[in-house]
Image (spheres, helix red, strand yellow):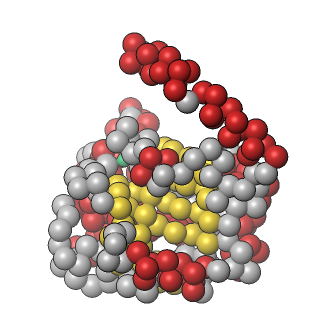
């Protein structure tokens, strides 16, 4: 807590005045650009690695960057994630949703272990909220991971995005650079795109191409950030060599 209180003192000295000015500007002209879903991991600092500022993004965080599929709710959407989607995309008319996963994700490492029946038993799930959360919402990611495993990590997977008709192909870690848990994390990040599209209140916007869903993946070991390119059918590193092509892709697909 000492660290936090001293940090607040530093903020008062260095940033407070400037931030209040920015709050006022945003209040009169709010133009948020994206709803950004990511993990609660303390190493993930999305505003820093995207260099975004006051008013730019709505950020939603939970263990394992999960957006539950709408079929988990019977007649009311009683969860933070759909409420955030409504606040962001319907009330504030934000046009882009980003899901950002990462390497060495503790929640995903747990999901990987839940392949073992003992670990994912109901008894364990009753004792552990995290276990239950990951089992309930991560099982489709595990199923896709197992498909990939059977194909010796070489065959592509098919995911659904904005609408049931808009499917895309994904080669997961084609250069075999990452651990199996990180491959699962990439699959899981892509799986959330389908979950987002399951919400009826977004359907019209998604069908009319007014709302777009993207996946990012942060490699904690190297600090590199990847964008899932539907054109390249894989996660592509965002760097000097690829940025023009990625900007073009974003323009073509999502404008
Ligand atoms: Zn994580």
What x and y, as percent, mark residue 148? 27, 76
Q: Is residue 24 left or right of residue 45?
A: right
Q: Nearer the viewer, residue 124 or 181?
A: 181
Q: Is residue 165 left or right of residue 26?
A: left
Total marks in image:
0
Q: Nearer the viewer, residue 20 or 156?
A: 20
Instruction: Specify the quadrant that holds the N terminus.
Output: top left
What x and y, as percent, mark residue 93? 76, 61
Instruction: Specify the quadrant that holds the C terminus.
Output: bottom right
Give the quarter of the image for residue 234.
bottom left
Is residue 155 at all visible to an observer of this figure?
yes
What x and y, as percent, mark residue 172? 30, 75
Q: Nearer the viewer, residue 181 or 21?
A: 21
- Against 229, residue 113 (above or below) is above
What x and y, as percent, mark residue 49? 42, 52
Residue at the image point whose x is 73% and y is 46% from the top: 26
Give the quarter of the image for residue 25.
top right
Q: Nearer the viewer, residue 144 or 93?
A: 93
Is residue 157 at all visible to an observer of this figure?
no
- Against 118, residue 138 (above or below) is below
Farthest residue, direction right: 28
Residue at the image point whose x is 36% and y is 77% from the top: 242
Give the quarter of the image for residue 235.
bottom left
Q: Is residue 54 left or right of residue 226?
A: right
Farthest residue, direction top: 2
Residue at the image point whose x is 34% and y is 69% from the top: 239
Residue at the image point whose x is 68% and y is 40% from the top: 22
């Amino acid at each position: 807590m000492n660290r936090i209180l001293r940090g607040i003192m530093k903020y008062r000295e260095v940033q407070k005045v400037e931030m209040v000015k920015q709050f006022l500007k945003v209040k009169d002209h709010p133009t948020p650009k994206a709803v950004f879903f990511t993990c609660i991991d303390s190493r993930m600092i999305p505003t820093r690695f995207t260099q975004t500022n006051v008013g730019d993004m709505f950020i939603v965080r939970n263990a394992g960057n999960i957006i539950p599929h709408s079929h988990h709710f019977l007649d009311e959407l009683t969860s933070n994630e759909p409420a955030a989607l409504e606040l962001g995309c319907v009330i504030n008319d934000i046009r882009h949703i980003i899901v950002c996963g990462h390497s060495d994700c503790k929640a995903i490492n747990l999901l990987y272990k839940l392949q073992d029946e003992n670990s994912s038993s109901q008894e364990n799930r009753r004792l552990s909220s995290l276990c239950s959360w990951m089992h309930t919402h991560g099982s489709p990611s595990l199923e896709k991971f197992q498909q990939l495993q059977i194909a010796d990590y070489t065959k592509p997977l098919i995911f659904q995005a904005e609408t049931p008709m808009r499917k895309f192909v994904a080669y997961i870690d084609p250069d075999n650079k990452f651990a199996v848990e990180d491959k699962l994390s990439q699959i899981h990040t892509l799986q959330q795109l389908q979950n987002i599209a399951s919400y009826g209140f977004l359907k019209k916007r998604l069908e009319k191409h007014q709302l777009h869903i993207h996946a990012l993946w942060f490699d904690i070991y190297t600090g590199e950030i990847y964008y899932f390119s539907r054109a390249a059918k894989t996660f592509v590193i965002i760097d000097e060599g690829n940025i023009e092509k990625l900007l073009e892709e974003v323009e073509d697909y999502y404008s």
